[in-house]
Image (tube, helix red, strand yellow):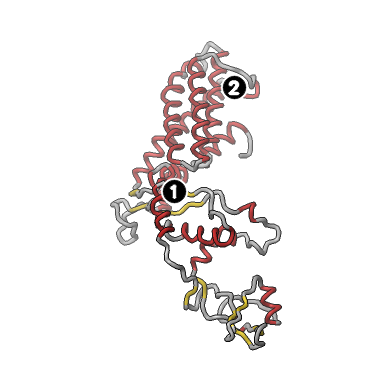
Amino acid sequence: KHFKNGRFLKSLENAPDWNISRNRYWGSPVPVWECECGERFVPGSIKELEDAAGRKVTDLHKPEIDEVTITCQKCSKSVKRVSEVLDSWIEAGSASFAERHYPFNASEKLEDFFPPDYIAEYTGQIRAWFYILHVIGAALYDTPAFKNVNVTGVVMGSDGKKMSKNLGNYPDPKEMLEKYGGDALRLYLMGSPVMNGEDIDISEDNYKIQVRGMLLILWNCYNFFVSYAMVDKWEHESEDKNFESKNVLDVWILSLLHNLILSVTEDLNAYDTVAAITKLEKFVNEFSTWYIRRSRDRVGPSAENVEDRNAFYWTCEHVLVSVSKLLAPVTPFIAEEIFRNLTGKES
């Protein structure tokens, strides 16, 4: 909110006039043919330009486009294009609809994809890309340029300074991915203050924290379930899908799970990954520490109560599958592995 009602609002209130043309060679040529008499021609498509020029146009860039002339409709003189090119921010600000070649792609309808549901960029774009998107969206379509936005902070080096190869003040991303996996990086960044617009100092220790504090714990829970389910030859298909356990541990963890699903779904719908990950990490730890640990004597060869044993397996599998679905947007690799192995479904 402080970005929206503070920095962004102020940038709108104090925005200077924007000269969208530049006296440069490289760039998108300004599509204006201006005659000495003051008459201007602005083609809306390549076909319009070809009809006006009476020739085929195969290249819209300089210098080829500068050779295309038209006849002035007012004074009949030969007219050349103005020499300027467009500010590159015009292209960046048109990304939401230009990426689909709109309006020239007849199969696309603007309302089907514009404004986009979600965009993300760092704080430096508040007065730049975010502003330009809104200017163009409002000017062309009289609508906001996006429905939801996530303004991130800046990922700094381990020493709090700007990341620099010369200083070597950050862990090599490729090495970290090979060592800890993509899920650890995603969990680390998407659960960090950087997602709320704050700067963070990146370090290898934070990768380790995500592996030890979340991913390994979840995997150990999954491994415990699979190992003992195989020992006891338990299969979900043989159980009643409407089965309800009377064991207080099962009732407790399912109650927590129900609340977790509601809460995390609400957070993710609001694009609040920090809140969602915080709740998921807490649940996984409670699932391991309180539920799994206190249910160990319910399974295995020494377990005598078959009904209670089956209740544990049904509950544990239900929890693991549900958590994998909630984690899929954040940690897709471990989530997919657990979900596919337990359900037999493709994804």
| Residue type (three-letter) at the residue carrying disc 1 | Leu
Identify the residue at the far bottom of this view: 77
Q: Mark 2 points at which residue?
A: 234
Q: Residue 300 versus residue 248: which sits nearer the camera?
A: 248
Return the x and y of residue 128 as percentages of the image width and height. Answer: 44, 61
Reply above or below: 183 against 38: above
Label annotation for residue 77: none
**Mark 1 or 2: the one toward you:** 1
Label 2 environment density (alpha carbons within 10 Å; few <14, some 14–19, many ≥20): some
Residue tagged 1: 177
Check the image and report above or below for 100 versus 281: below
Query: Which numbered disc, 1 or 2, marks the residue that appears first in the sequence?
Result: 1
Residue furthest left as drawn: 159
User: Residue 9's quadrant in the figure?
Assistant: bottom left
Q: Could you tell me which residue is drawn at 39 percent across and 35 percent down?
A: 213
Q: Is residue 264 above or below residue 288?
A: below
Q: For mark 1, does the 10 Å Cα neighbourhood hold few (<14), some (14 to 19), or many (20 or more) residues?
A: some
Q: Position of residue 13 (x, y in %)?
A: 42, 58
As drawn, 283 above or below 54 = above
Residue 196: which quarter of the image? top left
Q: Residue at 46%, 23% (x, y): give it.
A: 292
Lateral position of residue 24 relative to residue 63, left or right: left
